[in-house]
Image (cartoon, rainbow, N blue to C red):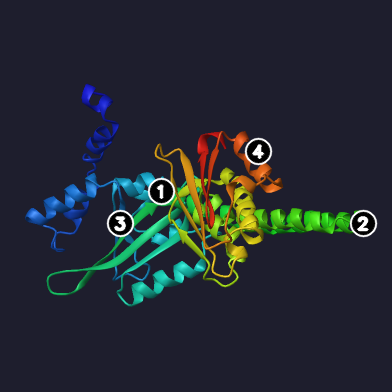
C-alpha cells in the first residue's frame, strides 16, 4: 500500500473499486442497450466506483435474472459474479424474510413502479443483514423498458438503533408503571401509619411530597432514555395541581434540558414553595399569583429557577419563622452545592434557586 493509501483507507478502497471490470463486461454483452460512447464510460465509472451495491435485472425473462452486479453488491452478499448472474434476486431471501415487503416488490415489478422496502436478506455464508432495497424501471430513449435497477444498502446498524430506541421507550413505560405502584405503596403505608398513630396531618403533608415526586418522574420517564429531560415538563407537572383556577400561575421557560438526576430535587423544592404559597403566600389570597421561570445557569452547567409571588397577604419579614419546608429545601440544596436567595416583598416571596448540575 502506498503512503497516500495508508493515510486514507477510503481512498485506497475507492482505487480498488475502480478496477472492477464487471461494467465493461456488461457493456460488451449488451451493446444495443444505449450504454455506449460517453454514457457507457459514465456508466462504467459510476458502477465501479460507487460503494452502493447495485444490480440490473432483465425485465423480459420470467424470473427477472440478474444481468449485472457491481463489486459492492458482490462484497455485500459474499457471492462471486458467476454465482449471481442469471439468478433471480430472490436468491438472497431466506426463511426469516418477511413476505410483506416481498409482495410489495412483486407489485412494483408488475406495475413498472418504483419501490423502497426494507427486508431481511442472507449472505452466502448464511449471515443475515437488513437490506434497504430501492427498485425501479429503466427505459431507453424510445420509452421501452430495458432493465430493472436495484440498489441495496445494509441498514442493519440503523435497524438496531431503532430497536434500541423502541426498547428504551418500552422500558420507560414499564418503569413508569412500577414507579406509580411504588409511590402508591409508600403513600398507603404513610396513610396507615398516620391513622394508627393519630398524626393524619403529618401523614398528609408527607404524602403531598410523595405525590409531587411521582408527578415529576411520571412526565419525564419517556424522555429520560436520551440521558436528559425537558425540565419544563417536570416543573409543570409538579405545579399545575396547585393552580386550581388555571389563571394564578405563570410559567416562563421552555426547551431547557437537564440531567434526569435533577428531577427529585427540583420536584421537592417546588412542592415546598407551592405548599407555602398555598398556606401563607400568594395563593392564600384571592388575587394572588405566582410566576415561575427557569433557564440554564450562565456557565451552562446548572439550572436557575426564579419563584415570584405577588398579590398575597402583607408580609412582615421580621415575623417570618423557618418551618419544616424551609429546612427541607435548605438541606436538599446543601447536598448539591446549590443555593437559594429569599427576598420577601410586601405581598410575596421572591426566591432564586441555583442548582449546579455537575453536583447532582
Which label lies toward us, 1 or 4? 4
156 with respect to 33 (left or right): right
Q: Which residue is mark 1?
A: 77
Q: Name, please, the residue furthest toward the left.
A: 37
Q: Name, please, the residue furthest toward the right.
A: 196
**Callout 4 environment at 10 Å: few (<14), some (14 to 19), or many (20+)?**
few
Of pointers 1 and 4, the one earlier in the residue sequence: 1
Q: Quadrant of the N terminus?
A: top left
How far apart, in angstroms, are the residues tagged by discs 4 and 3?
68 Å
Q: Which residue is mark 3?
A: 55
Q: Name, please, the residue furthest toward the top.
A: 3
**Callout 3 environment at 10 Å: few (<14), some (14 to 19), or many (20+)?**
many
In the rendered image, residue 130, in percent from the top left (x then y), is placed at 46, 54
In the rendered image, residue 141, in percent from the top left (x then y), is placed at 12, 70
Of pointers 4 and 3, the one earlier in the residue sequence: 3
Q: Secondary structure at mark 4?
A: helix
- Residue at 57% from the left image edge and 44% from the top image edge: 262
Q: Quadrant of the C terminus?
A: top right
Query: Quadrant location of residue 148?
Result: bottom left
**Above or below, 324 relative to 148:** above
Of pointers 3 and 1, the one earlier in the residue sequence: 3
Q: Which residue is mark 4?
A: 331
How far apart, in angstroms, are the residues tagged by discs 2 and 4?
29 Å
Q: Secondary structure at mark 1?
A: helix
The reply to whether dot 2 and dot 4 touch (C-beta < 8 Å) is no
234 with respect to 82 (left or right): right
In the rendered image, residue 67, in percent from the top left (x then y), is placed at 28, 58
Amino acid at each position: 500500500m502506498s503512503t497516500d493509501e495508508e493515510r486514507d483507507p477510503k481512498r485506497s478502497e475507492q482505487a480498488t473499486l475502480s478496477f472492477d471490470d464487471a461494467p465493461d463486461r456488461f457493456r460488451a454483452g449488451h451493446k444495443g442497450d444505449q450504454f455506449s460512447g460517453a454514457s457507457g464510460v459514465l456508466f462504467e465509472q459510476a458502477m465501479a466506483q460507487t460503494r452502493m451495491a447495485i444490480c440490473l435485472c432483465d425485465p423480459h425473462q420470467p424470473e427477472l435474472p440478474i444481468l449485472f452486479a457491481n463489486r459492492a453488491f458482490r462484497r455485500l452478499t459474499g457471492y462471486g459474479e458467476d454465482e449471481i448472474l442469471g439468478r433471480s434476486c430472490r436468491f438472497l431471501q431466506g426463511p426469516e424474510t418477511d413476505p410483506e415487503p416481498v409482495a410489495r416488490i412483486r407489485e412494483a415489478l408488475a406495475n413498472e413502479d418504483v419501490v423502497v422496502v426494507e427486508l431481511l436478506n442472507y449472505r452466502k455464508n448464511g449471515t443475515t443483514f437488513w437490506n434497504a432495497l430501492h427498485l425501479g424501471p429503466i427505459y431507453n430513449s424510445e420509452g421501452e423498458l430495458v432493465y430493472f435497477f436495484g440498489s441495496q444498502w445494509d441498514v442493519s446498524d440503523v435497524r438496531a438503533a431503532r430497536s434500541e430506541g423502541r426498547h428504551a421507550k418500552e422500558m420507560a413505560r414499564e418503569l413508569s408503571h412500577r414507579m406509580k405502584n411504588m409511590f402508591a405503596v409508600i403513600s398507603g403505608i404513610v396513610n396507615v401509619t398516620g391513622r394508627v398513630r393519630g398524626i393524619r396531618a403529618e401523614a398528609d403533608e408527607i404524602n403531598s411530597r410523595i405525590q409531587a415526586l411521582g408527578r415529576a418522574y411520571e412526565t419525564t420517564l419517556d424522555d429520560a432514555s436520551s440521558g436528559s429531560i425537558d425540565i419544563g415538563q417536570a416543573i409543570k407537572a409538579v405545579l399545575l395541581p396547585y393552580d386550581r383556577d388555571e389563571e394564578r400561575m405563570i410559567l416562563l421557560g421552555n426547551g431547557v434540558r437537564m440531567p434526569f438526576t435533577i428531577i427529585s430535587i427540583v420536584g421537592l423544592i417546588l412542592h415546598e414553595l407551592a405548599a407555602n404559597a398555598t398556606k401563607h403566600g400568594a395563593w392564600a389570597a384571592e388575587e394572588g399569583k405566582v410566576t415561575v421561570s427557569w433557564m440554564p445557569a450562565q456557565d451552562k452547567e446548572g439550572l436557575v429557577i426564579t419563584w415570584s409571588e405577588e398579590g398575597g397577604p402583607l408580609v412582615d419579614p421580621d415575623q417570618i419563622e423557618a418551618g419544616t419546608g424551609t429546612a427541607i429545601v435548605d438541606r436538599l440544596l446543601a447536598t448539591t452545592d446549590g443555593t437559594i436567595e429569599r427576598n420577601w416583598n410586601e405581598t410575596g416571596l421572591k426566591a432564586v434557586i441555583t442548582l449546579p448540575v455537575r453536583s447532582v
